[in-house]
Image (spheres, grey):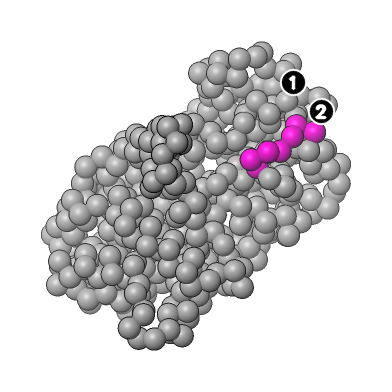
Amino acid sequence: MRVLFTTLAAATHVHTQVPLAWALRAAGHEVRMTSQPDAVEHIRRAGLTAVPVGAPLAQEALVQELDERRADALESGMDGPETLDYLALTDISETRPERMTYPDMHAKQLMLAQGAFPSQSDPGMIDDLVRFARWWRPDLVVWDTMTFAGPVAAMACGAAHARLLFGLDLIGWLRLHYREALAARHPLLRDDPLADWLGWTLDTYDCAFSEEALVGQWTLDPMPTSLALPVPGPRVPVRYVPYNGPSVIPPWVHERPAKPRVCVTLGVSQQEVFGAHRASVGDILTAVAELDVEVIATLDEDQVGSLGVELPPNVRAVGFVPLDALLPSCAVVISHAGAGTMHTALHHGVPQVLVPDPLWDAARKAERLVAAGAGLAVADPRCFTADELRALVRRVLEEPSFAAGTARIRAETLATPAPADIVPGLERLSAEFRR
């Protein structure tokens, strides 16, 4: 079987796909992974065969440009689209059905269809990917839920295709409620921006739009079922297997810490996409400085220098250490609720204290983790205090209920089929769905 992976050009998105790609390759299948040129090195370093498509995504530069335009517009007193918060405009993280109104869902999808998603799967990238898929003839396309070039290529070449999620299925949840809202409207008032965008795109390759272009023929979901959104449709649970990229583990990681070890990490996704962390690292370190703990903070020299103060004596800054190796020695992890960090902490049974970032599903994941008793989160990530965060860390360290709650989810995670275990099922589904 030939399997084509396609992913957003960001290290964390590549890393999410690597374990399944390895499993399929080890089972004897041919595997290729495609993305914009920005991601080629990440793919190559994972030992996989990369196929660059389209122009570089350069997402950090794009986000920086948008931020600078907004800052200039606000400073000059302008009143126009430049002053709008692009994160808020495309925020589809509301999951409470009673608050998912038609006007809001429609407006968010309009912005995604006109800006965010086409920028991540631009016409040049899609055309390159379709051309490669029609030449290579994959049996299965596994696509990142943010990269709609994947389903277009699959439908254009007749391959079966599945979404591989990295967090909560926000798009599936949104589409479920939006389509219900559309059905209640007059037929002449059923505009569907995402369907229109993908419909026009698919028409270029003589294909017709269907909902599978947005949600896949089935979904591969690494989120533990107890935390996942109950989106209907074919779902294949798959265990999250941590992969942090090529690395060397420093000797101190294996030493038993004399005090409870606390990991502070804001992941690589914010730094890679936004060019900076959106939470205050200094405030977080101030919070843990007064605790009787050993703190490992994943900060490089430039980030430490930008703090403008000396690190507290109980803080060790490390530019990079694989969380898969570090977290088993930790009593707590403080993070932004990013997908890789949260999944790795659950995999190793480490309670979490969260300062959720405004990106995608972080706030919703934090709510679900807190409800499951596996951690705590600050009330408002935009204006938390060191005292507030310190109190949360102290509670998680001292109250055994959090370790117990995390252990329950870890047991659920380890009972979920590993990537190698689902390969026979993927073979059957591919034979059923490919044309």
Is label 1 in a helix, a strand or a loop?
Answer: loop
Above or below, 36 against 301 in this view is: below
- Classify residue 182 as left or right of residue 401: left
| Chief SS of the magenta region | loop
Percent x, y for residue 253? 64, 28
Frontmost residue, 406 versus 279? 279
Left or right: 248 with respect to 332?
A: left
Query: Which residue shows up at 55% across the image and 30% down it?
Result: 321
Find residue 218 and report its horizontal and vertical position in percent.
41, 72
Q: Residue at x 41, y 39 (%)?
A: 78
Instruction: Say what secondary structure mark 2 lies in.
Output: loop
Q: Is residue 385 magenta?
A: yes
- On residue 291, the disc is 2
Residue drawn at x 45%, y 55% as measured from the top left: 90
In the picture, residue 263 is in which quadrant? top right
Whether residue 253 is in magenta: the answer is: no
Mark 2: amino acid: Leu
Q: Nearer the viewer, residue 303 or 155?
A: 303
| Between 348 and 302, the one nearer to me in the picture | 302
Residue 242 location (% of width, % of height):
53, 46
Where is residue 204? Give x, y as percent.
15, 66
**Amino acid at the residue labelled 1:** Asn
Q: Residue at x 34, y 66 (%)?
A: 194
Write down the residue under mark 1: 314
Q: Which residues are magenta?
A: 381-387
